[in-house]
Amino acid sequence: MGDRWSVEVDRSICIGSGMCLNHAPGRFALDSARQSRPSDPETDADEKVLAAAEGCPVEAITITMAGSGEIVFPPED
């Protein structure tokens, strides 16, 4: 069994660009306020989800290891 990630979108900074939908189709959705949310807040580790986080223009997406909370994205400075 592979790694599991927890995915969160900070809705206070999400601008609804939809870039996450382009990078990871089916993994994110825009609500009626045009703000992103993960389709499933816990998911198998997935390069497309990571690409969505990396491609977010306002860095609203945070990915952590499910269970441990270790940060996957954004990288710690």
Image: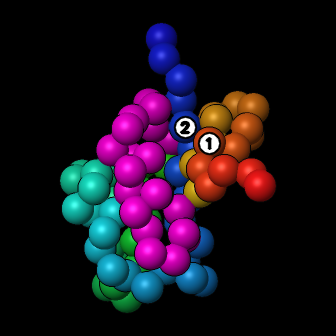
What element does badge 2 sit on?
A: strand
Residue at coordinates 45% horizontally, 37% vertically from top-left? 43
Residue at coordinates 27% horizontally, 63% vertically from top-left? 21
Q: Quadrant of residue 65?
A: top right
**Is disc 2 surrounded by few (<14), some (14 to 19) or many (20+) residues within 10 Å?**
many
Q: Decide if residue 30 is in sight here.
A: yes
Residue 40 place in picture, x, y as percent = 42, 48
The front one of 22 and 5 is 22
Q: Which residues are magenta?
A: 42-61
Q: Which residue is mark 1?
A: 72
The front one of 57 and 4 is 57
User: Is 16 contained in the magenta span?
Assistant: no
Q: Is residue 53 left or right of residue 31?
A: right
User: Is 59 contained in the magenta span?
Assistant: yes
Q: Decide if residue 29 is in sight here.
A: no
Q: How many marks?
A: 2
Residue 13 place in picture, x, y as percent = 57, 82
Residue 46 place in picture, x, y as percent = 39, 35
Disc 2 marks a residue whose amino acid type is Trp
Query: Is the C-beta separation of discs 1 and 2 under 8 Å?
Result: yes
Disc 1 marks a residue whose amino acid type is Val
Q: Is residue 28 above or below residue 11?
A: above
Residue at coordinates 74% horizontally, 51% vertically from top-left? 76
The front one of 43 and 53 is 53
Q: Which residue is mark 2?
A: 5
- The C terminus lies in quadrant: bottom right
The front one of 11 and 53 is 53
* Alpha carbon distance from label 1 to label 2: 8 Å
Q: Quadrant of residue 18?
A: bottom left
**Is disc 1 surrounded by few (<14), some (14 to 19) or many (20+) residues within 10 Å?**
some
Q: Earlier in the sequence, mark 1 or mark 2?
A: 2
